[in-house]
Amino acid sequence: MVDLTERVSALAAIYETGTFGATVDGGPSVAFSERRPLSIVHVAGKPDDKAFSDGVKTACGCDLPTTPGDIATSGDLSLVWLAPERWLAVCPNRGSGVLEAAFRDACGDSGAIIDVSHGRTVIRLSGANARTVLMKGAPLDFHKKVFTPGRAAQSAISQCGTLITCPAEDTFDVYVFRAFGQHMWEWLTDAAGEFGYSVETPAT
Amino acid sequence: MSRSYRTPEGGRIDRSKLLNFTFDGKAYTGFQGDTLASALLANGVKLIARSFKYHRPRGIMSAGPEEPCGMIQLREGNRTEPNIRATQVELFDGLQASSQNRWPSVKWDINSINNLFNRMLPAGFYYKTFMWPKAMWMTYEEVIRHAAGMGRSADLPDPDRYEHMHAYCDVLVAGGGPAGLMAAKSAAESGARVILVDEHPELGGHLRGRKSKVGAKDAMDWVAGVRAELEAMEDVTILSRTTVASYYDHNMLVLNEHTGDHLPTAEGWTPRQRNWKVWAKQVVLATGSIERPLVFGNNDVPGVMLTNAIQTYANQYGVTPGNNAVIFTNNDSAYEAVLDMHDAGIRVAAVVDNRKVETAATATVRERGIPVFHNHVVFNVNGNKHGVKSVEVMALNEAGDHVAGSIIKLECDVLGMSGGWTPTVHLFSQSRGKLKWNEELTTFVPSESFQQERSAGACNATWGLNGCLKEGAKAGAEAAKAAGFVGAKAASAPKSDDHGMGDIRAMWRVPQPPHTHLKRFVDFQDDVATSDVELAVREGYTSIEHAKRYTTLGMGTDQGKTSNVNGLAIVSEELDKPIPEVGHTTFRPPYTAVTMGAITGTERGHHFSPIRRSPLHDWHLNAGATMVPAGMWMRAQYYQHPGEGMWDAIYRETLNVRNNVGLFDVSPLGKIDVQGPDAAEFLNRCYINGFGKLAVGKCRYGVMLREDGMIFDDGTTSRFSENHFMMTTTTAKAGPVMQHLEYLLDVEWPELNVHVVSVTEEWCGMAVAGPNSRELLSRITDADVSDEAIPFMGVTEVDICGVPGRIYRISFSGELAYEVGVPSDWGTHVWSQLMEKGADMGVAPYGTEAMGIMRIEKGHVVGAELNGRTTADDLGFGPMTSSKKAFIGQHAIGKPAFLETDRKQLTGLKSVDGKTKIPRGAQIVADPAGRIPMEQLGEVTANCYSPSMKEFIGLAIVKNGRERKGEKLWAYSPLTNEKCQVELVSPHMYDPEGEKVRG
Amino acid sequence: MLIKCPWCGDRALQEFSYQGDATVQRPAEPAEPTDAKWDDEWYQFVYLRDDPKGWHDELWQHNLGCRKHFKARRNTVTHEIADTGPMNEELKGGDK
Ligand SMILES: [Zn+2]
């Protein structure tokens, strides 16, 4: 099911594909893109409540990750640990309310499910210097052996609360509240200026 | 006259790269690899600055960050910076510098008259002389500030770029000298993540200024080899031109990286500086040591230098600071320097050594025909702003406390002094490590560590190169082990030269002949002489911390790097107490000054604070809205049409809502999703009024208190199902309310099964307000929007313009109104549809100003009234308060203070003459003509002209206000000298019966 | 400072906010609102806090991380943190 009305990104007014920043030998070493449109659902419940954990598995196909900072995946969906009783389910847009309903139906009263698909801006950075850009902003350990694919952490960049995930080697997704989207985009691309960066077409 | 003080060859400078620079407007040249100090010395410039208090001529004393004298103003215009140490400035082409503390010029300084009257400026002078009469202080201060200037800061915005970095590592090594290099190597070889930090562009520490050998290699070749090895390792980061500025709790260190200071300007994306925060599991401090001056008469004349500085200028920069040197020492380290000076072509007239006995080192200089005077001291320097002319030497008596015999006058143009070495324990001390006095070395040395660190090399009072290499390697391995790399081993280093300091003969004040009163400086930057320290002790400032503040000893920007030990030793002599009993002053971060830009980083200009943008932000901009910050949000203030004034626009927008229909962006209101079996119970406990019986599909206004009974926040909460609510908060309190709810669920009521999630950003909120709002709504949804289907305070989930949304029948304006919520990405779509479908009826957006007027007309409260000092009853919410349940703040509201009859209560105000506007921020008083101070009966919280009622109105919080309706008082603003007679009325000034809202 | 969130592990101070004294107990709801003992308990709870020198059990929130509240035993003189843990667990270490 697709939404009939096109969703407008928080970055709509400033999004421009191309190559920017310093001219560096070997070309830009950071690539940016907005991940959109996405379905994002906040899932809360008690992991030791079988009705809830079974419900989550039914709704999205993967087990609840209970190790802090872990991400479970099932097909194109990721289930990110946020807090002891909170997760974020993220996947390419399934249509308004569809993912939320899947969780509600499967978990019943055992879980608190709320759609936040429109409430987040997700910025993807990849490339050899993506880590360095993030190091300028967040007080996290981004070392290759520490912040590995399949891991996530919440922290702050430029005073904004962020969720940062590492879906693949040298690839990071920065989630911020939608209202901070433009600020975060401007901040991150500015921080990448010295390396040269490209902006790619948005994709999920 | 002008001749070069550059050696014909040698030095770690690139003689093929000639650099032009100016000092005080005069053009000079230097080479790539010079510092400003070495380039000035190479050009024979001796006079660099005037001293802080006495305006005495000062030159270059050191070759490093300890420099107390050679402070300059660097660069011009918007990049100018004062108090820069010439010894730390890498020369670049086009550099412009000027001397400071001088007027009109460094050579003809009018204020050096202070020097002639220096008896007028003893320690504590400021405290004693200028504190009375009080009124004169301002005058004195102005004169002093002018006289004792510390350079000038730029008065234009800083054009440079600054950044922050964050890093974690297993072992951080502070200092890239021999000990630091071996530590980094040992730790890195174990597999640990290592960050090696050094303040110079080139690693090597003191080796840069010496001619040492490591094994068969020149030491600097060995350094280059180790650097290459380290750079090849994946987990090693080498940060040159970087100072470990501060050592904080839990092994968090702040580094100040000078990424662009060595460039003419840091252009484009290159930051000028970067501040790093590093969290290190273990730290190795290899920060080296600093040579101490000796304290004798006129020891501040330009040309009196630390001995190792002369050696460094000769070896590293190929610069001879003089042609004819005398060296005054109390230890062996100066002798190696003498040999290097001699090699560089400097004539050494004599070595004056206060020690009685010759050492092995003595022979090495005697071999070159350099005379050595043992048991002698230099007690005076003759010279002026042109430099040293000669020094006066006398023998010591048997006890060493007086000079004896006849004066030997030695002609020279540079005097090297060496009073021994002080380990650089600043970082160790900042980390809370305890220092211990070592009598033999006459210095404080690291003793007990508090954090995860260890000291190695000269900063641990290990002087010889062999010792430094070994100790560094051991420290690096230990640190790696402690960080979990159990197999770590100390890397081996080739055997090397090993010069020590030998025995030292401490002489904290060099004696002078009877009846002479020469200025013997202890702290050169702050112009503190022995007489000041002596006076402070005589006047009872016997604690070292008091003496420091009274004399300002060690309080300059050099943090007393060259003066601390000498200063406290003199205090201890005056008190006749051993040094450990006197103790030392506290070392505070940063080690060297950090520019404000680096601390600020990117948080300036439009990144000073993040900007929150509503989903309709761009629409507002396109519609010509004037935007106004509200917290982090940007909100549309008003939409001015061509030919309209600001107030025209605001009144037009207001009347369009009152008479027709308007749209207002309410997206910034805080929205919190509340779910769970105990959700209703939770809301009951949070609000003063009940939510248990709120029907599904309805919303209710609620007031939340703090534990102390004052109002915390207000807003409406809607119920979507038995266990699912959505709370709204004021824009300003969205964050604090969320935190409050989380606190209650985590800490106070963990038994409640409730989950709260912020959904502020999920929803684009639009108020559709005015008599035509229902008609407009019916055009954008197929759903029934009749009064029966969506009654006042009803909420329904419907399809709006093809997207799922919610319609709330709530009103802040006092008109028939709705709030439409749709997922944010569709906000612009729905808003545009509202504008389009309402075009024929004249729908118009309104901004925060129009909203503000309408809320005053209706007496609705906002932050001005919810100011943390008002109770529910004060603002008229008393009747809402439930007595059937417990809620936060309930215990407080029965307290006597809450029940007093003269509490200030919300009231409406009307301008009595109908023409005078109610001054904003005014006080409510009975009679503005009365005597000040007069009784303050209340304060105006809001004021406006009401275009609907065509009069000036306002809101106020007035003592017993509800009972005073009809009374005439005055709104009086002494600050702006405005006053207005006001009549107290009900705050519900517009449509008091609320018929329109329910229409 | 580096604070160990019981869930997220060691994190920089700037991700946390101090939320007060973890040793104070919110009094039970009143049986009888005029009870003097109850009154005093509330007075203590709302207005009075100790300012201990040395070890102190504090309440912190990992507000830029998982947003959970937790307890930390911190030395107010040296800033050492002996232990952190969820609200329902006893802290260890320090000289308590
Ligand atoms: Zn956490």
Image (cartoon, coloured by chain):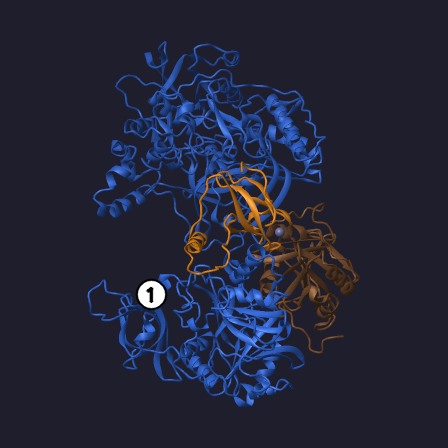
Chain colours: A brown, B blue, C orange
Q: Is mark 1 within 8 Å of ligand 1?
A: no
Q: Position of residue B866 (x, y in %)?
A: 43, 67
Q: Position of residue B897 (x, y in %)?
A: 35, 62
Residue B412 appears left or right of C95:
left
Image vertical order of residue B256 relative to residue B879, above or below: above
Between A10 and B531, the one nearer to me in the picture: A10
Residue underneath mark 1: B900
Image vertical order of residue A73 relative to residue B905, above or below: above
Q: Element at badge 1?
A: loop
Q: Position of residue B836 (x, y in %)?
A: 59, 85
Residue B740 appears left or right of B297:
right
Res B967 visible: yes
Quarter of the image with the N terminus of chain B in it? top left
Res A17 visible: no
Q: Residue furthest bottom?
A: B840
Residue B631 appears left or right of A176:
left
Image vertical order of residue B824 relative to residue B913, above or below: above
Identify residue type, mark 1. Answer: Glu
- Crowd rating for badge 1 (residues with CA inside 10 Å; few <14, some 14–19, many 20+): few
Residue shown at 73% from the left, 61% from the top: A52
Between B755 and B350, the one nearer to me in the picture: B755
Q: How many marks?
A: 1
Q: Position of residue B916 (x, y in %)?
A: 29, 78
Residue shown at 48% from the left, 10% from the top: B358
In which chain is the residue bearing label 1? B
Residue B943 appears left or right of A21:
left
Between C86 and B677, the one nearer to me in the picture: B677
